[in-house]
Image (tube, coloured by chain):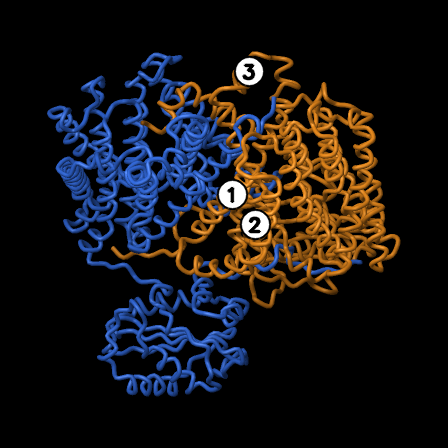
Chain colours: A blue, B orange
Amino acid sequence: MCILANTAIPSHEIALLFLATGLLLAMARLLGEFAKRLGLPSVLGELLAGVFLGPTILGWAFPHVEATIFPPAGEIATAIHAFTALGIALFLLVAGMEVDLSTVWRQGRSAVTVAVMGMAIPFILGFGLAWMAPRWLGIQPNASHSVFALFVAIALAITALPVIAKILMDLHLYRSNIGMVIVAAAILNDLVGWLVFAFLIGLMGGKGPHAFTITQTVLLTLAFAVCMLTLGRWLIDRILPWFQAHASWPGGIIGTALAMALLCAAFTEWIGVHAIFGAFMFGVALGDSRHLREQTRATLDQFISFFFAPLFFATIGLEVNFATNFDLPLILIITLIATIGKIVGCGLGARWSGFSNRQAWAVGFGMNARGAMEIILGLLAMEAGLINQRLFVALVVMAMLTSLFSGSMIQWVLGGRKRPKLSELLTSNGFVKLQATDRRSAVNELVQALRTKTDGDSVDREAINWEGLSHRVWAREHLLPTNSEHGLAIVRASFMELKEPLIAVGASSAGIDFMSPDKQPAKLICLLLTHPDELRLQRSLLSDISRSFEDSEHVDHAVGVTNFTEFLALLNSGKPAGPPVPAKVESVV
Amino acid sequence: MCILANTAIPSHEIALLFLATGLLLAMARLLGEFAKRLGLPSVLGELLAGVFLGPTILGWAFPHVEATIFPPAGEIATAIHAFTALGIALFLLVAGMEVDLSTVWRQGRSAVTVAVMGMAIPFILGFGLAWMAPRWLGIQPNASHSVFALFVAIALAITALPVIAKILMDLHLYRSNIGMVIVAAAILNDLVGWLVFAFLIGLMGGKGPHAFTITQTVLLTLAFAVCMLTLGRWLIDRILPWFQAHASWPGGIIGTALAMALLCAAFTEWIGVHAIFGAFMFGVALGDSRHLREQTRATLDQFISFFFAPLFFATIGLEVNFATNFDLPLILIITLIATIGKIVGCGLGARWSGFSNRQAWAVGFGMNARGAMEIILGLLAMEAGLINQRLFVALVVMAMLTSLFSGSMIQWVLGGRKRPKLSELLTSNGFVKLQATDRRSAVNELVQALRTKTDGDSVDREAINWEGLSHRVWAREHLLPTNSEHGLAIVRASFMELKEPLIAVGASSAGIDFMSPDKQPAKLICLLLTHPDELRLQRSLLSDISRSFEDSEHVDHAVGVTNFTEFLALLNSGKPAGPPVPAKVESVV
């Protein structure tokens, strides 16, 4: 009769459930952030969290502890299964929201050519491989030979849209011609890939009693997909403004979107394809509405990507022993064939669409990233009894490797490079509480600060003539004075001997007169030194600085910080919130 | 061996799980928004969602359907139990984050006096009542008499901080003297209330095997609370900037905060008090850090308040039959005693702190709101086998009634009133696509638009001389022309015959010359008509309009909308996001 944990699930089980989810989440965050700092995808760290807490490491070292926290059966196991089922569906909702159909229309034929070729070649290669050597690859004893070959074909043909979008943004290529073609092709690839995979799950069938035959399932799935992309999209675009006008904001839309995604997931699960297909298609229809606000999107994305998704990826490591199932030859073959198929397919497609050779290579490497989507695909196939754990591990490693090299290969091929951000270039010695009261000594102090070496920075300080540099900065400043605006002054100079840009930031609570037109003293003085050839970098850093301190309020916050870490936090995340009260001060009583 | 739904939980069960959560969430949102529009707390609507889908209505009309979607036992039931256990803990995390300890320090002695008196009197009344008539109130057969009396005492003494904060903000009283004392007292009340309740759960004990004796539990709980409020707070304040500087933002902090809250919850559940106490205390420590950013707070708040909390409140209605357990005399007695105790206690405390009689009443009515906290308290007691469903329903109804009347009573006592917002005053006839090309005809068009009656507006249009009004607006505009700024012009005028303010908004894509100093034509023209005595209201509406259209980008968005609903959506939720790509356009290749 009672609902909450205490009677339904005993108290010590509840404590263990909180402990298990808390541990998984904490470990996933820790390793995820660690991976990110090393330039690896954070999903890799999240997977490793499960590897650490699961049979591979914790279960091997302390089997009893692992069995207590993560029991293989019982109420905690059921609860965690249910969480991850929910988590995967919501993750696909967010993935679907990133699909922007208008990009596909705009790119038109090139996108279609790249997508079709980029799917066809790896599909054929994968099918051939799986047809010839199913046992070596890792088919399960009772699985159908042809279904298995189809699965491997799809697994090699898939592309991970979110990973690709991220890489292109990092390289400032997202809005370029080539970037838009890659993104559009990846979107098509995503849509077709999930549709075909949904059918495949229908073909596999054997998941227990089903309400529908395979033909019915296929027809219903097609009908659902078409319906969501036409009527569903149109309806959502109509209803959203009404919601925003009349319901709580943004919570009302968040709650309703989650409810609808779950209902669509229930529907697709019921008709015999997987729940995630429904959530994904709803995400596509929702994300496409021009009325969807940035804050709604961000709240859904951040919470799901940092709560449900890490829980889900970490649980994978709990269930599979990555050490005993690690088969190097299999991994190499899978990765090689997947990569060759994608690069040849997409490359040919790009060439036929009029891109240069070099650009065609970039398109191929870009589309090669597989990311989290491959892992989800593999997991579902493993659970359906189609593939064994050895092949699953190989697919996971392949997904990580292809994602990892995608960005650096594009850079290498196009000769472009990732432009460093302000927060990456600033080191702790570059942040100073200024003693100076005039321009000249402020500049001096900042140059002196840059002279000291800090851990982990790679600047060759011996090669620089610091006295000369200081003099030349001042000479330039004297001739062409920097104007400050709302308390921010940015002193720039270029020097041949600088291999890498140097940045120093000085905070002066008293303020220093920088002859500003607005008569305000400068409280934040930035010194930005670059190589004369790096004009583009200089401009991008300049705009980074101006954007971070866009008004006097932001400048005052920066001057008020007590150490370098707080300053860096300000750069990364905006100004602190202050107490949770409305901004308007009023005293009625 | 496998983890996800397909093998661990059969496919049709997964479909049902998604269906059940999706339905609960959708219904909770629908009724929650409906309640809000009627001026009731949205938690009431969320509770009713469960009443509709549970035994009270759906189970009574279609018992078979209800039993299929929400089975009383099995995997779905376990999964939903686990969701709600997680949901309640995360809800308390958010509640804890609203506790601002510095408010308490600032208010000092008055807050303590009000809090102590406001707890003591209802506590004594509740204890007396429960001691004398335990059976009539609804003690469970095996429960201890004294523990039951203690519980009723606490149940009447509690106060709901989030509800109170919301009410005071709506009335523009949050920052006033009296508002700050109420909030500070409510914070103290919250802290003490949950601490005492945690002990009570320790006293009840009988939840199965426990690792600790009651004395140990009490000592550990105290140690944990003190630790979180001192060392924990200090540590979090130190670590947050480091996180913001080096981890993903805001996701890294969101993920870590959730992990820590779950681990604290596991700890308190393990030592024998409820999991929610740990989550609540962690929330207090986290929310108190001056480094916590607004976006982190908002993301946690919105997702938890609109996903986990509605699921949790709706499930309550699934488990309890509100029709058969509705006992009117009991409800009236409980509500009466709770209200008298709070008003006398807090009122006396406020008088002793130097407030006037009228203000003392306002403090009493403010502190009387109980909201969601009372429901959680009652639920835990019911599950622990302390109280029966009849008393639980009475507590729920009392919580709703006291929250409901709190705001209107304060208004009535202080004579203040809720100032209407722009979006509440604007009706569909008041939004016009202007044909006019000059100032005079624009003003005319807007006045004519206001003349038409719309559904549900209460303005007495017969009493107004429209021709005269139009002339007088123009006469004023002619003498004292309105200046437009970044395309926005606000024409104001006051008239004796207007009982309620009238607002019209005209959009002109061509723009109308309003002799602006920035030489830009006005594209959005607002006409704001008020009674001459309503200067304060006029000013607040004026600032609403300026804030909603603070720059030319916002004005352009407003001019581009196609209907009134989209315009209202813009007012409520800011400008649309556009496609999910970075703002910076760049073409490298």
User: Does the residue at mark 2 contact the one at mark 1 (Cβ under 8 Å)?
Assistant: yes
Relative horizontal placement of residue B79, taking residue A358 as reference (left or right): right
Residue type at mark 2: give it: Phe
Q: Which mark is residue B267?
A: 1
Residue at image location 32% in from the left, 27% down from the top: B2
Pick whichever, A324 or A138, lies toward us. A324
From the viewer's perspective, is B520 left or right of A100? right
Residue B536 locus on image (x, y percent): 77, 57
Would residue A28 be found to the left or right of residue B176 on screen?
A: left
The residue at 22%/53% (across/down) is A408
Circle 3 is placed at which residue position?
B67
Residue B332 found in image quarter? top right
Residue type beneath disc 3: Ala
Mark 3 vs 2, N-terminal side = 3
Q: Residue at x 71, y 58 (%)?
A: B175
The kind of secondary structure element at disc 2 is helix
**Figure quadrant of residue B457:** top right
Q: Position of residue A150 (x, y in %)?
A: 21, 24
* A404 or B458, nearer to the observer: A404
Q: Chain of mark 1?
A: B
For the residues labelled 2 and 1, the Cα–Cα distance comes to 9 Å
| Element marked by disc 1 | helix
Along the line of sight, the residue nearer the viewer: B164 or A347: B164
Counting residues from the N terminus, which is met first, the one under dot 3 or under dot 1?
3
Disc 3: which chain?
A: B
Gap in angstroms between the C-alphas marked 3 and 2: 42 Å
The disc at residue B460 is none
Going from the N terminus, do you reach mark 2 or mark 1 first? 2
Q: Are marks 3 and 2 on the same chain?
A: yes
Q: Mark 2 highlights which residue? A: B224
**In the rendered image, which quarter is residue B268 located in?**
top right
